[in-house]
Amino acid sequence: MKGIKFFWILFVLFLTNQQLIAQIDSIHNPVLPGFNPDPCIVNVNDDYYIVTSSFEWFPGIPIYHSKDLINWNQIGHVLTRKSQLDMRGIGDSDGIFAPSITYHKGLYYVIFTTVQDGVNWSLKGYPNYIVTARDPKGPWSEPVLVNSLGFDPFLFIDDNEEAYVLFRTFDHRPGKPASAGIGMHSIDLKTFQPIGEPKLIYTGWNRNSAEGPKLLKKDGYYYLFTAEGGTSYEHYEAVARSKSIWGEYERSPQIFYTTRGDSSSSIQKAGHGTVFSTPNGEWYTTHLGSRPLSSLGACPLGRETFIQKVRWNAGAWPVLDNTTGFPEEAVVAPVKATGNKREKELYTFFDSFDSKKIDVSFQTLREPWDKSWLNLERKKGTLALKGRRALGSRFDQSLVVRRLTSLTQTYETALEFDPKDFRHLAGLACYYDTKHFFSLGLTVDDHGDRQLVLTGVDKTYKQLAFKGLEGSEAKVRLKVSFSNKHFQFYFSTKEGEWDKIGPEIQSSILSDDYTDGFTGAMVGLFSQDMLYEREWAYFDYLKVY
């Protein structure tokens, strides 16, 4: 009997150990949930750094760090000052496109495009800049203009110290292809000034769609990786190679990876990444992908960051290291992975606003925050927001948000606000862009009586619900809960008692697919004063669960 009991104890210990091994040895995707597209990674010794696109959101270019590819922490942003990035008035889903990070001899380089509006894609503004830092946490240098040839730039430094900039090129002339493919020119690594003329080096499999170029040198070949097929469900990553950096590039006989053709996959729109090796010689790739609400449906979380394991086949081409060829939710981690992914930290958050510094995960629109309108010291233990322009403006919006990171997630806050006019409004907002957002705010009616108003903009503005507030309770609690295809607003004037306000709203309205945008759903706090721009709202906390 004792022998049987001892056997079961050993068996349970074995299973527990195997579960721990499985957990430690797995990268769980997405590694960066929510709006984190176009991931570019660099490996320096035992450290990995990822930068992603930020579009119209400020600060620009979030930067994340990991020791094992499993656990990731945001350590800051690359562009934190107005002198580095001024986006006031910039269009929805314009701004920072596809930054790339490179390391060389103690210096980190980030090259990026600030996309500006134009008549069409070939006539938009595409100034490309480089910034540098000794420490990825910053501070980063002032930007140096490199060219204005197109977006998705990449800086490649060869073994002989010669440097090159790659980019998606455009041609605005009638009768010419609007985007013929990938261009490149040499660059002086000290001054960042171009050397010689730009040349077209690759047209891609699908003419007019090759973008996101990344260059890797391995075993005498230059491998050129490109994202093609657009950014939606036909997206894929291609690879070509050449013995000469200028080409001609030979295309791989197969697509590197994609999720098109597999509508059952939980990961869709895969492509646009960076292939890299670990210190132990293992190979991986980052890539963007989206998790739809339904098969090939809308994706409110936007384009997220994933990692896949890579191997090199007999023909010396990179392929995904699995049996399907499709990206997977869990992949084998590097041999020196250190521990379980901190899942809870990716999907939950609490800030009591007791610090004098705003949390690194918060974003504002188009401009840096300053104490004149976002203040953590005005009233102790609160985040104070001075009312400014309406949420639909592209100037001076008092809005501070975080990425939605799960299709089932709740945001909650407590608000103290003394509105005196219907033009005063403060509360909780679910935001995609200036033409797609919903907000629950505290205001007053024409008689000066306090009321909550639920408003929505789905191309046109609508007031969806009103609720008069009785009593003298100064503090109003607000929350919004996402439940896959819908989200619902709530309010409370008595702690622990929540009431619904307004209808369930379709989550799909806050998606790339619905808006034709490139970002993702954001949720947070706002304040408007369309009278004199001087009324302050005070938020006790922000809780995400």
Image (cartoon, rainbow, N blue to C red):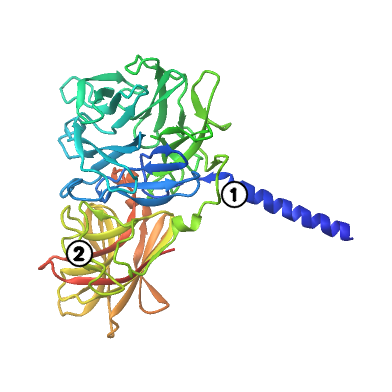
Nearer to the camera, 193 or 406: 193
Residue 287, compared with residue 66, is above or below; it is: above
Please, which residue is most extreme toward the left here? 532
Whether residue 227 sits left or right of residue 295 in the image: it is: left
Q: Marks 1 and 2: CB-CB under 8 Å? A: no
Nearer to the camera, 288 or 468: 288
Nearer to the camera, 344 or 376: 376
Query: Which quadrant of the figure has residue 207?
Result: top left
Q: Where residue 10 sits: x, y (%)? A: 78, 54
Query: Which quadrant of the figure has residue 198?
Result: top left
The structure residue drawn at horizontal position 29% and vertical position 44%, both measured from the top left corner, is 517
Any mark on residue 343, and which?
none
Query: Which quadrant of the figure has residue 321?
Result: top right
* Quarter of the C terminus within the rendering: bottom left
Residue at image mark 1? 23
Whether residue 403 sits left or right of residue 94 in the image: it is: right
Amino acid carrying label 1: it is Gln
The structure residue drawn at horizontal position 63% and vertical position 51%, both measured from the top left corner, is 20
Nearer to the camera, 509 or 37: 37
Amino acid carrying label 2: it is Lys
Q: Of discs 1 and 2, which sits in the foreground?
A: 2
Q: Is residue 323 visible?
A: yes
* Quarter of the N terminus within the rendering: bottom right
Q: Regarding mark 2 in the picture, which secondary structure is present there?
A: loop
Q: Where residue 265 sits: x, y (%)? A: 50, 40
Residue 272, compared with residue 60, is above or below; it is: above
Whether residue 308 sits left or right of residue 98 in the image: it is: right
Any mark on residue 371, and which?
2
